[in-house]
């Protein structure tokens, strides 16, 4: 499934999701901005998204990837082939994107197994015609995560997906994410365009404040001797049913406990 919206002349948001019985599994947004495609959606929607760009007769000059997750880099293989363009990825995850490991079954169903794709490393500053792209290291959601500042548009991948995070993936490092949120807040930007939402500065400020507040609660309880499971029970037990379903279906690759442990620094510096 694909939905799109023209924000300005040269700026289009493209939402893609695998379809099942007319329902979307999980929407992800990619962007077309002045010849650049930022992120690419998942393998299941790769051809559909490439068809769309072709049908709209958009001039695609290059593809930029914010991180290696399959719902962001999964279309890169098709885009590279279809438009004969370079794909640029964070240098830390070049090897993974060139040779992706097999992903868990539930992710294969929702997003699909990414194909190997030849990518070039992103540089801190890159010029495409008159357009200057600044790449900013914003680890946290993933170890390789970067954001892009192009004109006054900030593209933030999956840095913010929910202003009140409840559940996160196992490898997410929230100590790094807190720093990354502070980094982007030090920049001037009109809005932040993510894979799962468009955010204004106040939303990012609120997200950071919510995470810091939760970290304080979690740390206090840990100091009192509570385990991660006990902290989840105390602080994150009143959650929508959907959260519990995601935990089960992902075999706890996504969980509230991951969030608690990440806030306690367990994912940071290999603790
Ligand atoms: Zn991601």
Image (tube, rainbow, N blue to C red):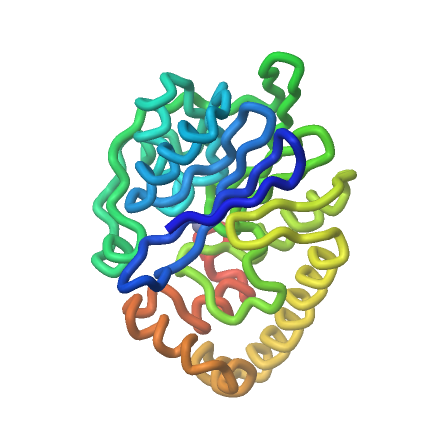
62 in relation to 248, above or below: above
Asked if 121 appears above or below 240 in the picture, the reply is above
State the image coordinates of residue 22 (x, y, percent, origin top left): 32, 62
Count of numbered circles on the image: 0
Location of residue 40 by image quarter: top left
Residue at 67% from the left image edge and 62% from the top image edge: 207
Give the x, y percent position of residue 77: 31, 30
252 sits to left or right of 197: left
Residue drawn at (65%, 31%), measured in percent from left and top? 9
Question: Where 176 sits versus 168, above or below?
Answer: above
Residue 265: percent from left, percent from top: 53, 61
Looking at the image, which is closer to me, 271 or 205?
Answer: 205
- Which residue is pictured at 28% across the width and 61% down the height? 20
Q: Residue at x 59, y 78 (%)?
A: 223
The answer to which of 95 and 158 lies nearer the viewer is: 158
Image coordinates for residue 37, horizontal then vertical, percent: 50, 31
Frontmost residue, 28 versus 148: 28
Q: In this view, does 230 lie to the left or right of 212?
A: left
Give residue 5's quadrant in the image.
Answer: top right
In this image, 57 relative to 190: left or right? left
Residue 10 is left or right of residue 44, and the answer is right
Q: Height in image: 237 above or below 198?
A: below
- Name the image quarter holding the C terminus: bottom left
């Amino acid at each position: 499934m694909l939905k799109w919206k023209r924000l300005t002349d040269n700026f289009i948001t493209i939402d893609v999701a695998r379809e099942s019985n007319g329902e979307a599994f999980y929407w992800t947004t990619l962007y077309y901005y002045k010849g650049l495609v930022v992120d690419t959606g998942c393998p299941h929607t790769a051809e559909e998204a490439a068809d769309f760009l072709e049908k709209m007769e958009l001039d695609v000059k290059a593809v930029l990837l914010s991180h290696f997750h399959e719902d962001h880099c999964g279309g890169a293989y098709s885009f590279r082939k279809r438009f004969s363009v370079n794909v640029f990825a964070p240098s830390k995850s070049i090897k993974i994107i060139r040779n992706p490991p097999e992903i868990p079954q539930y992710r294969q169903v929702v997003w699909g197994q990414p194909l190997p794709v030849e990518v070039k490393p992103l540089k801190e500053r890159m010029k495409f015609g008159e357009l200057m792209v600044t790449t900013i290291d914003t680890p946290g959601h993933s170890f390789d995560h970067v954001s892009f500042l192009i004109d006054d548009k900030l593209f933030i991948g999956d840095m913010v997906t929910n202003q009140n995070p409840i559940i996160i993936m196992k490898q997410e490092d929230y100590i790094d994410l807190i720093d990354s949120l502070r980094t982007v807040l030090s920049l001037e930007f009109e809005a932040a365009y993510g894979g799962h939402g468009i955010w204004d500065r106040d939303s990012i400020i609120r997200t950071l404040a919510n995470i810091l507040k939760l970290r304080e609660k979690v740390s206090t309880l840990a100091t009192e001797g509570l385990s991660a499971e006990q902290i989840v029970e105390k602080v994150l037990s009143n959650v929508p049913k959907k959260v519990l379903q995601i935990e089960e279906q992902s075999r706890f690759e996504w969980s509230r406990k991951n969030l608690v442990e990440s806030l306690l620094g367990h994912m940071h510096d290999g603790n």
